[in-house]
Structure formats: C-alpha cells, structure tokens
Image (cartoon, grey):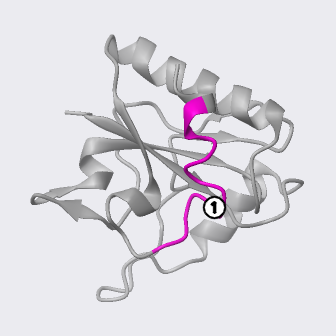
Amino acid sequence: DITGITIHYTATLNTVSVERIAQAQLNTIADPISGAKFPAIAYTLVVDGQGAPHLCHDLATRCWHSGAIVDGVARNASHVGICWIGNLAPTDAQLLGLKAAINYVQGQLGRTLLVEGHRDAPYPTSCPGPTWPTYRGAIIP
C-alpha cells in the first residue's frame, strides 16, 4: 500500500551519525496525547553526511516519520520516509545518496512513486529544510 516517498532532514550538523539520530528519537515523545515514544528510528532510510544511504527498516515496516493525514490516510501508512542528515542543504554526495535511496525503494516495489517533502503533505514543518524544493529535481530518478 505504499504510494509515495516523504523526504525529511534532521536539522542537525551533517556529522551526526545515524546511530545518534536513532538514540535521540528513542527518547522523544512521538504522540503527545498518549505519551508514546518512538519505537525505533523514524525513517526507513537515512542518508548520512557522506552521502551513504543506510537501510534502517525493511519496506514492510511502517515508521513514525510523519504526522500528516491526507484524505483520511496517514502518511506513515502510505509513504516511505527517507531522511538526510544535515541542516541547510544536502551536499552533492547526499543528493546522490537520496537518489540512490529513492531508486532502491522504487526498484524494490517495481514502480515509480511520488516524492514529496515532509511539509508538502501539507504538514506544519520546515522539513526537509530551507532549500526544499530547489533540490527536488536533483533526487528524482
């Protein structure tokens, strides 16, 4: 039932590790009503500061990457979350890593998916960074 890919960013230095992002999220309340904390890293794939994509979950695992609900469907259920580590704009290496991550997801599913930024859902956030959507064209395969 995956219909799209949502791009995220960490709003951190790009030197922060994937493991550190996961540790920080595990200590964060994801649902303010129930008090539930993130059960694991919130993204299926994370592109590190060097541009290497890291598969954090298989595609069958639904992650808590977006609180957006569009036409009654939660983006967590319908979209794969891909995140790049950084604050302003992805580096050239990260753009290649994002493109590789998108290619991986689409290749595994055997179809082209809509790629959106987290804030495009619409959702009240600046994610995936201040330069989105200027880099969108560079990551669409």
Considering every residue shown, the one lying at the far left of the view is 72
Q: Is the magenta stretch mostly helix, strand or loop?
A: loop
The vertical placement of 7 against 100, above or below, is below
Identify the residue under disc 1. Answer: 129
Q: Where is residue 10 in the image (x, y as percent from the top left)?
A: 67, 61
Q: Which of 31 and 12 is in front in this view?
A: 12
Give the image quarter of residue 32: bottom left
Per the rendered image, the range of residues in magenta is 125-137
The vertical placement of 139 against 72, above or below, is above
Q: In the image, 57: left or right of 64?
A: right
The residue located at (48%, 80%) in the rendering is 29
Disc 1: CA contacts within 10 A as few (<14), some (14-19) or many (>=20):
many
The residue located at (40%, 51%) in the rendering is 63
Is residue 43 on the magenta stretch? no
- Secondary structure of the residue carrying tag 1 is loop
The residue located at (43%, 63%) in the rendering is 119
